[in-house]
Amino acid sequence: MRGVTISDKDARGVLAFDLRDILKYLPNVADSEWEVGRLEYVAATPVEAFERTSDTEERIAGTDLIRLANEIDQLVEGEVRGYPRGGREPWVIVRAVDSTSFDVLATREDVLEALRRNFADVVDLPPQ
C-alpha cells in the first residue's frame, strides 16, 4: 500500500478537516465494509456504535460509517479500515494521528490522487 499524510490547518493552527471530509473523496465508501479500531474522539455525546465496534472488531456498513463520522467533532486518534464486501484485505486505511494529521493508505493510486487534489498540505508516505 502507498499512502499520504494530510495536515491541512486552519488559521488557529488546528486541523481544518476530519474523517468525514476524507470519506467524501474516497470511492466506494458506502459499498465497503469498515473495521473501526480503538478511537479517541471529541463529540457532544458518546457515539455508541464506535464504542461497540472498537471493542468487538465487527465490521459496519459504509453508510453507517459516514453517519457516525458526522456525529463526531474531531477524531483524535485511531483508524478505520475499508474492505470490499466479504474481502480479507483492506483497500484503504484511514488513521488519525494525535490530532495533528491523518494518514491514508490505499491500494489504488487514484484514491491518493483524489486526496492530493482536494487537500492542501499532503505529503507522500514511504511505501509500506
Image (cartoon, grey):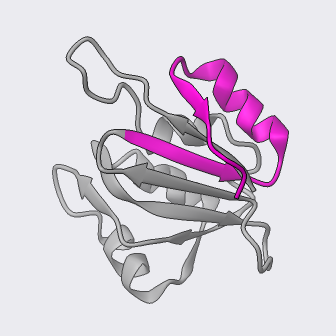
Find the residue positioned furthest to the front.
126
Above or below for 35 versus 105: below
Above or below for 54 versus 98: below
Question: Is residue 15 within the magenta segment?
Answer: no
Find the residue positioned furthest to the left.
44
Give the residue at x 26% y 55%. Answer: 41
Above or below for 38 versus 116: below
Residue 72 seen in the figure: no
Question: Is residue 109 within the magenta segment?
Answer: yes
Task: Tell me the quarter of the image containing the C terminus.
Answer: bottom right
Residue 55 seen in the figure: yes
Find the residue positioned furthest to the bottom.
56
Q: Which range is magenta?
A: 101-128
On the image, the x and y values in percent for residue 120 come to: 53, 17
Task: Tell me the quarter of the image containing the N terminus.
Answer: bottom right
Residue 55 relative to residue 59: left or right: left
User: Number of marks in the image?
Assistant: 0
Q: As rendered, which of 19 and 109 lies closer to the eye?
A: 109
On the image, the x and y values in percent for residue 68 come to: 42, 55
Give the residue at x 72% y 67%. Answer: 90
Which quarter of the figure has residue 22?
top right
Give the residue at x 31% y 17%. Answer: 10
Q: As rendered, which of 64 and 99 lies closer to the eye?
A: 99
Residue 51 relative to residue 103: left or right: left
On the image, the x and y values in percent for residue 28 come to: 76, 50
On the image, the x and y values in percent for residue 70 come to: 40, 44
Q: As rendered, which of 16 and 28 lies closer to the eye?
A: 16
Give the residue at x 80% y 77%. Answer: 87
